[in-house]
Image: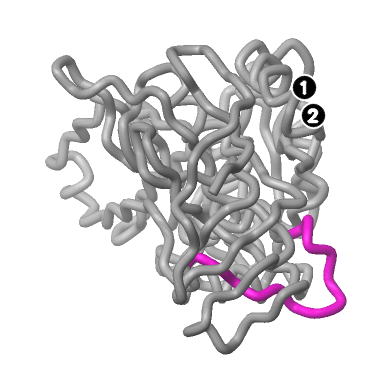
Amino acid sequence: MKAEAVVFTAPNTVEFQTVDCPDPGPEDIVLRLTHSWISNGTEGSFLRGERIAGDTPYREGSPWPFPIVVGYQRVGVVEWVGAEITDLEVGETVFSTYGRIDGLFQDRGGQCSPSVCRRENVWKLPPDTDPLSFAGLVLTQVGYNCGIRPSVEIGDAAVVMGDGMVGQWAAQTLAWRGARVLLVGRHEDRLAKFPQGHGRYCLNAREADWKEAVRRLFPEGLQVAVDTVGSIELLEDVQEFMRHYGHLVSAGFYGTQDSLPLQSPRHKELSVDLVAGLSRPRMDRTRELVAAGHLQTLPLITHRFPAARATDAWRLIESKSEPVMGVILEW
């Protein structure tokens, strides 16, 4: 089966091409995409040749990860249903992660339509909701995972490092759980998307000292510190503010610079929560929270491009020539 796809053909090279997909079988559906939500961090590291799979960085001697179709979050309409699938119907709008692809570096990818998908990679969407609000469901789930993993009581203090999408959803989740949250970033336009008040604070680290803000806001110490930017230095620096038995949550991509000394966090018996990937129960719960309005997704969308203009989308994401966060491809 032929499909149109966003293909990374070489470092920093994006093309819109026709690719081959396997013919669908009895356990598959065929999904025609309406929207896909780019994962700026993960997909960008593939584009730059920094990553070859999931959380696996490129190292000297690794296979060169091109050509490749990346992406893992999209919504669309079911166009065909295999004989062994009984709970989906043609015409339903669903969320999906990967589809199957032939002949490229990886045999799966998200930025591809129509797409042959296994049933386990598909989620029904709640009725009477905007499908686009679920288009970034995997990343929303990563932020939810950051915020749900640590032990938190109402009123506990938390700091989230990074004002990107994962940082936003981590901060939203912690605030929903009753924590007082400081979101630290470097972009005023992004920080403005986390409204302040009622125990929610923002700080632009370009303009103010985040350490001083932590001391002032949370003199009792932090229960939670979340790193979404991939900085071992931040994970080390924040430890002086942690309470005994607090939680360090790591959600960044550290490449080959991923060594965290353990003796220092041992002094306060800190837990280190390593966040990655997805699980079906977390995806289900995230879907519920988005549907209920507890996790806000649509306000984080800043740009939309036709899928055929994916090169322009990536030029913007990589150059940051204007404020950018959530980028949607329309199919």
Q: Which residue is mark 1?
A: 323
> Closer to us: mark 1 or mark 2?
1
What residue is shown at x 46% (from left), y 76% (from top)? 26
The amino acid pointed to by label 1 is Pro
* Residue 293, visible in the rendered structure: yes
Q: Position of residue 45 (x, y in %)?
A: 44, 25
The amino acid pointed to by label 2 is Asp
- Residue 79's place in the image compared with 33, above or below, is below
Q: Which residue is mark 2?
A: 189
Residue nearest the observer in this picture, 136 or 246 = 136
Which of marks 2 and 1 precedes in the sequence? 2
Q: Residues within 10 Å of mark 1 (few under 14, many from 20)?
A: few
Q: What's the magenta region?
A: 121-133
Q: Residues within 10 Å of mark 2 (few under 14, many from 20)?
A: few
Q: Position of residue 276 (x, y in %)?
A: 37, 51
The local secondary structure at tag 1 comes to: loop
**Residue 216 found in image quarter:** top right
Question: In the rendered view, how is the structure colored?
Answer: one colour
* Residue 187, visible in the rendered structure: no
What residue is shown at x 24% (from left), y 30% (from top)? 258
Q: Position of residue 87 (x, y in %)?
A: 60, 87
